[in-house]
Amino acid sequence: MFKITDLIDLQTLAESVELEFKQAQGQDGQGKLPQDFWPTYSAMANTRGGYVVLGVKEKKGQFIPVG
C-alpha cells in the first residue's frame, strides 16, 4: 500500500478503477458523504475493491486537500 505523507505524494497519484478522490465536505461543511460516493463504493465492492480518499478535490488535474 502506498502511504501518503505529504502533498508531493498526493500529486503523484491518479484516479483509476481502484482509486477515487472525493471532496466530501458536505453542504454544511460537516463532512457529509457526497451523493456520488455510493455508486463508486458499490462499483469497487463488486469488482476487485479499491480506495476512496475523502477530503481531496481535483482542480485542473491536480489533487488538493480540503477541510
Image (cartoon, rainbow, N blue to C red):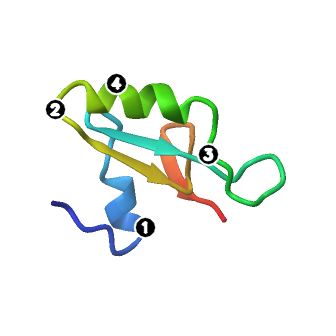
Left or right relative to 2: residue 28: right
Quadrant containing the C terminus is: bottom right
Mark 3, secondary structure of its residue: loop
Q: Earlier in the sequence, mark 3 or mark 1?
A: 1
Residue 29 lies, in percent from the top left, at 78, 58
Extreme residue in the right direction: 28
Q: Is residue 40 left or right of residue 30?
A: left
Distance in Å between CA atoms under marks 2 and 1:
27 Å
Residue 7, numbered circle: 1
- Of tags 2 and 1, which is closer to the observer? 2
Label whose residue precedes the other's in the sequence (1 or 4): 1
Q: Mark 2: which amino acid?
A: Arg
Label 3 Cα neighbours within 10 Å, binned few <14 / some 14-19 / many ≥20 = some
x and y percentages locating residue 16 in the rendered image:
29, 32
Q: Earlier in the sequence, mark 4 or mark 2?
A: 4
Amino acid type at mark 3:
Leu
Q: Which label lies toward us, 1 or 4?
A: 4
- The residue singled out by tag 3 in the image is 33
Looking at the picture, which amino acid does disc 4 mark? Answer: Ala
